[in-house]
Every structure is written in structure tokens, then in C-alpha cells.
Image (tube, rainbow, N blue to C red):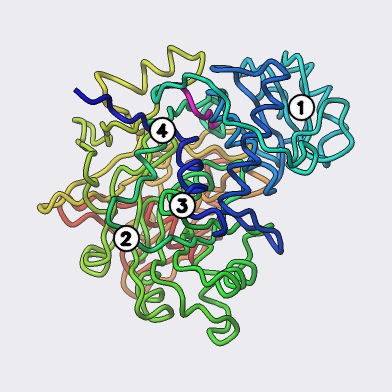
Amino acid sequence: MLAAVPMLIGDVFRRNAAVAPDDPAASLGEATLTHGQLDAAGNRVAAELATLGIGRGDRVVTWADTSLDLIPLFVGLARLGAVFAPLNARLGPEEAAGVAGLARAALLVADAERAGDAVAVASRAGIAATAGLGGGHAGPDLSPAAVGTDPHPPPDVAVDERDPHVIFFTSGSTGRPKGVVLSHRANWLRSFQGVFKDVPERTVCMFPLFHMAAFTLGLCAWQTRGEIVFVEQATAAALLGAVERHRANRLYCIPAVWARILETDPQRFDTSSLREVDTGTSATPIELIRSLKARFPGTVTRVYYGSTEVGSAATLPDALVLEKPGSVGPPPPGVDLRLAEDGEICVRSDFLTDGYFDDPEATAAALRDGWFQTGDLGALDEDGCLSIVGRKKEIIRSGGESVAPAEVEAVLAGHPDVREVAVVGLPDPKWGEVVCAVVVAEPGAEPDLEAVQAWCEGRLAGFKKPRRLERVAALPRTAATGQVQRALIVEQIASR
């Protein structure tokens, strides 16, 4: 019997370099790495890491903003069987140390902007060594410019496809952050585009290079011998300008970013190369889909639902995006999806997370008999298409206080001018979230925020009162069960 070819991330870059060495692999601004350059730089970085004692299974935490210097490090760690664990570059030193400590890492790699704090952060996180990407560091510089141009053979490491490949840290919005472990096999399967795709994918990426989606989109492009184009800031002008310069054929944006793009002058940038304009990751307003169809004729639009832990859990194909408003579609091939008795969405596939690093309790709570408990509530229609209803724990955290939407809704439902109401939390830089009442008014009535707040006086604590009010003609509901789609409400407000 022939041995199976392992699904190793490092091999993606090796094969691309052998077949398309001069084609672009990654770009940022005016800088570009070809597939050949990326593969060679990954080997040189791997060799340098090996001299630092980094080997199979070691965790390496990065604290760096979006830069092409991160990509060879990503490749080099994969070659060694070491684990790439990026921190959010926006974290301050104290926050960064707290999250980095979860990984029990062997090395912290920081960029030049964070060089001055790197040693202190590593010390507080219990990390013995530091290195840099660029100048200003006490430790070695792992940037491609610093490791030289001498050819290095690929490291001789027996990496297994089920070895950990990356750890992505959750935001910690429902407690302390957790490290989501993904294997080589999981990331390979998540990004594989099929054996018959003959057009390299050229994708413009809105996500920074500490975000799971940035590396997933990159691997999806690299699996086609294509190119991923990063931007320093995800503005409409930066994204559309990158599409024009690189003749990109794919652009994925969350609904709020698409809303900004749709406000730009259609004649300002040449986007005729686009073939795929995708969105997600949960409910997407039908108005946004119609606008994308009108703005980018000849393209396909798909709605993706998933997470760091599960990858893609459901996909609404282009053929159904106008027929199934508010839906995120059926599970893709290779994914099983079911609803628990309380409506929680549970997912099973070969590319789930292996669990949360060094957190057996959280892993046991999330993974039960091979099924990942998403924490999202859903509804399935007669065609097996999924709609996201809300979160299982729909607690709004506002100014450090917890607000239960159902409690506020019960009070507002008694207002004489309110026919229907849904309460949601909206992101807010000052309060974390603010309580928003979304109201369908009685005929002829026009309740405003002041009237609603006055109605709550004596009925609700001050922190539970709505700080924002939206009047709508109807609340979005699932077709099958009539449940209010809170996630879609939030996306509709954000898109406006």
C-alpha cells in the first residue's frame, strides 16, 4: 500500500516555488515576495530559528503589525514543526504579556515598533528569549533582510500533519482569552481549493496579519499558486486601490467594510478584474447583497459563517444569496451541522480545532463527542439552510455591567407605542457595548429614545436603559420558526 502524502503547510510553499518561482506570492504596498523568494526566505529563517534552539512543538509568539517580514517566519516555523502564535498588535505591553503567557512559549518575536517593550513583555509572560523583525532588538533579527541570501536546504524535521501548526488567541470577551490550536491538517483542509482550479487566486485582504482570517485567506490563495495582497489600513481606498494595482480577482470583506466601499465613487478605481466579492461571517443584510450585485456586475457573492475554532461551518452560494435573505446557507462538503435541543449550532468536521491550548476544561466544554459547541443559536429551513438567530449567552456587557436583553424587552413591550421590540448590544469604544432597542412602532406612533428611557424609569436600573433606539418596519425573523435574528439586526445597523 502506498503511504499517504501528509498535509503539511510547509509543503505548500515548497511546491509553489518549484512550479511558479517568479510569480507573486504576497504583497504589501510596493513590496512583493515571489513564491521562490518566500520559500527560500522561509528556509533561511527556519535555519536561524534552529540555531536558537527552536524545534518541533515549540511555541513562538509574535507581537508585530502587518508586514511581509512575518510571512517567511510563518513558513519557517511550519518547516520546523514549531507553532506560530500571533498576538494582536494593538495590545499594550501589559495585555500582550497576559495573553502571551498562555502559550508557554520558547520565543517572543516583536517588530521594531515594539522592540523597546519586548524584553519586559517576555519576562512577564515567562518567555526566556526574544528576537526581532527589524532593528532595535536585544535578540537576533529574523527579518529576511537580516538572515541573508545564502541558500539553505529545507530543515530535516519529521513533522506530522496532526502536529499543531498555529495558535490563535480569542479576544476574551466572555472571560480570559484562550489559545485556539489548529493542526497542519486542519489548516491545509480549510484552504484547499480543489484539483481543478486552474486560475491563481489573487486576493486583497482586509485583515491584519495577527488575525486568523488573514492567514486563512493567504493559504487559500497559496493553494492555487496565487497571491495575497495586504493593506496597512482597511480603508475603502486602500482595498480598492490594491484591487486595481494587482488585478485582484477576489475581495472578501465583512458587511461593515463593504458598506464603506459601496459609498466610494464607482469610477474612482478599476475593479473589473474582480470575480468573487464575498462576505460573512454570520447574517448579511439582503440590501447589501443587492448593492454588491449592482456595483460589481459579473461577480459571484457568497456568505460564509464560521469561526477560528471551526473554519467554515456554512456557506450560502451565489445561486441562493438573493433567494435566502438572512441565511448563511448549508454546511459545505465535509462538514456536519446540527442544532441542539436549545437551538445551539454544533459542528463536526476534519478541520476543527484540536482544542484550547493548556485549557482542558474549556476544551471539554466546547468539544463534546467530536462536536464543537459554537455558542450561536440557529434555525434550519426546509432546504437545510442555516440562519443565525443570536448567541446562546446573549448578555450585553456595558460599562462593566451585565444586561439581559430579554429583561429589557419585557419592559419595553409594555410601552403603548411599541408593537414589537428586540434588544441588542452594539459595539462602543467607551462602554464596550451599548444597549440598543430596535422597535416596530404601533401604527401612527413614533416613539423616540427619550420616551423609551422615561418608560424604563423605575422599571429598570439606569445601566439597563437603552442608549440607542432604532425604528424599523419589521424585525427580521427566520422563515421556518419565526425567531428574531438578532445577529442580522446588528449587521443591518452596522451596514447603515
Residues rendered magenta in the picture = 163-168
> Gap between marks 4 and 3, in whole Å?
32 Å
Front residue of this view, candidates 295 and 436: 295
> Gap between marks 1 and 3, in whole Å?
45 Å
In the structure shown, which secondary structural element does the residue marked by tag 1 occupy? helix
Question: Residue under circle 2?
Answer: 475
> Gap between marks 3 and 2, in whole Å?
53 Å
Q: Earlier in the sequence, mark 1 or mark 2?
A: 1
Question: Residue under circle 3?
Answer: 19
**Please, what is the three-letter code of the amino acid marked with disc 2?**
Leu
Question: Residue under circle 1?
Answer: 94
Q: Looking at the image, do the residues carrying marks 4 and 3 touch, with CB atoms under 8 Å apart?
A: no
Q: Looking at the image, do the residues carrying marks 4 and 2 touch, with CB atoms under 8 Å apart?
A: no
Q: Main secondary structure of the magenta part?
A: strand
The numbered disc on residue 309 is 4
**Please, what is the three-letter code of the amino acid marked with disc 1?**
Glu
Front residue of this view, candidates 484 and 90: 90
> Gap between marks 4 and 1, in whole Å?
26 Å
The image shows residue 47 at horizontal and vertical percentages of 67, 27
**Please, what is the three-letter code of the amino acid marked with disc 3?**
Val
The numbered disc on residue 267 is none
